[in-house]
Amino acid sequence: MSQSKELGASERESPNDRETSSGRERRVRVRYPTDRELMCQPGEGRLDQAWWLGRIADISTTGIAIVLEQLRQKFSAGTLLTVELQNWAGDVSRTLPTRVIHMNPNPEGGWLLGCAFEKPLTEEELKALL
């Protein structure tokens, strides 16, 4: 399990970084925990298709952890998932393609998806979304 870094509000590493085979942590990206809503859909994010409401568990420059409570299908690693993110003020919005890295049952219900951004965010882009 990942250990938290103390850089403010219990920031953690990104969901798409990995542990070594010995179990030692080698994650390098800071994850920012949050509990904001997002919209997502499998594929390229078409407006004529249904979007699902989910929550962001945490986000980093390289990926995002998403909780989907009403999901009835399972995604395999590598599945394209488009996410729509918005900052707290609602004045910054981004639609970003991600790839599912893992999907596990969430202890609080639903599913927890670890996803990697197709193109990593810059620190400035990430901070604009926080």
Image: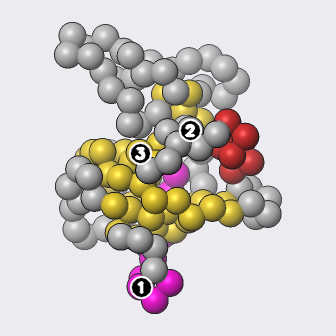
Residue 90 seen anywhere in this rendered image of the structure = yes
Number of on-image labels = 3
Q: CA distance from mark 3 to mark 2?
A: 9 Å
Report the side of 19 relative to 8 (left or right): left
Residue that appears at 47% across and 33% down: 14
Q: Is 34 or 49 nearer to us in this picture? A: 49
Asked if residue 118 is positioned above or below residue 122 in the image, the reply reads below
Query: Mark 1 or mark 3, which has the lower sequence index?
Result: 1
Q: How is the image coloured?
A: secondary structure
Q: In the rendered image, which quarter is residue 72 located in?
A: bottom left
Determine which of the numbered discs, if any, sits on residue 49 in the image. Answer: 1
Residue 53 lies in the magenta-colored region: yes
Mark 3: amino acid: Ala
Query: Mark 3 or mark 2, which has the lower sequence index?
Result: 2
Residue 64 seen anywhere in this rendered image of the structure = no
Image quarter of the N terminus:
top left
Q: Is 46 or 50 nearer to us in this picture? A: 46
Q: Which residues are magenta?
A: 47-56
Determine which of the numbered discs, if any, sits on residue 116 in the image. Answer: 3
Mark 2: amino acid: Thr
Q: CA distance from mark 2 to mark 1?
A: 27 Å
Percent x, y of residue 104: 26, 47
Q: CA distance from mark 1 to mark 3?
A: 22 Å
Describe the element under mark 1 as helix, strand or loop. Answer: loop
Describe the element under mark 3 as helix, strand or loop. Answer: strand
Mark 2 surroundings within 10 Å by alpha-carbon count, few (fewer than 14), some (14 through 19), many (20 or more): many
Q: In the rendered image, which quarter is residue 111 located in?
A: bottom left
Residue bearing the label numbered 2: 61
Asked if residue 19 is positioned above or below residue 115 in the image, the reply reads above
Percent x, y of residue 109: 33, 55
Residue 50 lies in the magenta-colored region: yes
